Amino acid sequence: MKNSTRIGNEPIDIPPKQLLVWIIIGLLGMSIYGSYYTVSAESVGVVQRFGHYHEVVNPGLHFKIPFGIDTVKQVPIKRQLKEEFGFGTPGATFARQTTSPQEWTLETTIVTGDLNTALVEWVIQFRIDNAFDFLFKVRDPAEALRDVSESVMREVIGDRTVDEVLTIGRQDIEASAARKMQEVVNLYEMGLQIDQVQLKNVDPPKPVQASFDEVNEAQQERERVINVARGEYNKAIPRAKGIAEQAILSAEGYAIQRVNNAEGDANRFNALFTEYIKAPAVTKRRLYLESMSSVLPNVTSKIIIDDRATSILPLLQIDKLTGERK
């Protein structure tokens, strides 16, 4: 019995054995083609046999049972993934990286602890830490992570005032949110590692944004004036302290100088007195000569008279002395 097929309008007879050979060759080619696979360098392969978990394989070339018995899912455990809230960047590398723009307003509107409202945009960066948990422990871990992130962020911001959220509390919010997200992820065994939480744009609601900007500018101007005053203070106070310290040191130096001079004069007097006791006449003579040696150079005219003269008027040449002085 022969099988026939048609090419155009003319039938072609194919022997059963030849047809069987072609079928066997086709099945063999399909089995060879489906019996190997390659895992990329940044991923691991999760092998499922008859739909059940079998093993996790490392990057490289591997073999499997074909015809759908073994299936492989590649999980990028070394890739940095992220999810964005309130905005979206082009070129997303993750299916749940962002949501539709219609949901951005709902994501970013958060009530603070003092019952005010803030518009908060943030992004979380994470990695797949456990491929088995990521695939089999949670139905949709990426969507679950979005829900966890939004819930934690509302909790963290709800514990703070609007001023803290908008100004000084950003780093504390990021650290607290990352820690609490990781706790929830570990609790649900999602197989994820939270690397970082970053706050992007944090603004007040649009109806009050202009007023908030004015208040913020006033606060900045106040801080600027305070800083200028502190700068002047820091310049004036050290200068005054320096002048005071200089005056004190100068006074102390002058006091030391006077004391040293007084002690020197006292020691000199004591030394002279000691010599005077030893030889009074000699000491008197020496003191007289020393005094005269310091006095006579300053005298311009010298008159020496006899101590026995009864009058000195005939001897004085008044006109000559007057002319010399002029």
Image (spheres, grey):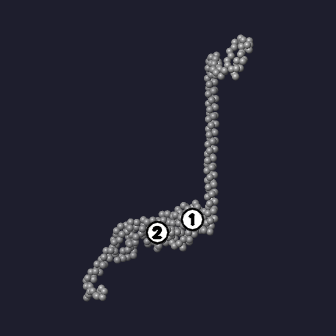
Query: In this figure, which residue is indicated by the disc labeled 2?
Result: 91
Marker disc for residue 11: none
Q: Picture coordinates of residue 102 (x, y %)?
A: 54, 73
Report the quarter where the C terminus lies.
top right
Residue depth check, mark 2 versus mark 1: number of the one nearer the observer: 2
In depth, the one of 8 and 20 nearer the eye is 8
SS under mark 2: loop
Residue 290's place in the image compared with 19, above or below, is above
Viewed as shown, does residue 71 lie left or right of 25? right
SS under mark 1: strand
Residue 246's place in the image compared with 183, above or below, is above
Q: Picture coordinates of residue 29 (x, y %)?
A: 30, 76
Q: Picture coordinates of residue 245 (x, y %)?
A: 62, 41
Q: CA distance from mark 2 to mark 1?
A: 24 Å
What amino acid is labelled 2 in the image? Gly
In depth, the one of 203 and 91 nearer the eye is 91
Residue shown at the point (40%, 72%) measured from the top left: 73
Residue shown at the point (62%, 61%) measured from the top left: 216
Viewed as shown, does residue 204 lie left or right of 91? right
Rate crowding at label 1 as few (under 14), some (14 to 19) or many (20 or more) other CA atoms within 10 Å.
some
* Residue 176 in view here: no
Marker disc for residue 202: 1
Question: Total label count?
Answer: 2
What amino acid is labelled 1 in the image? Val
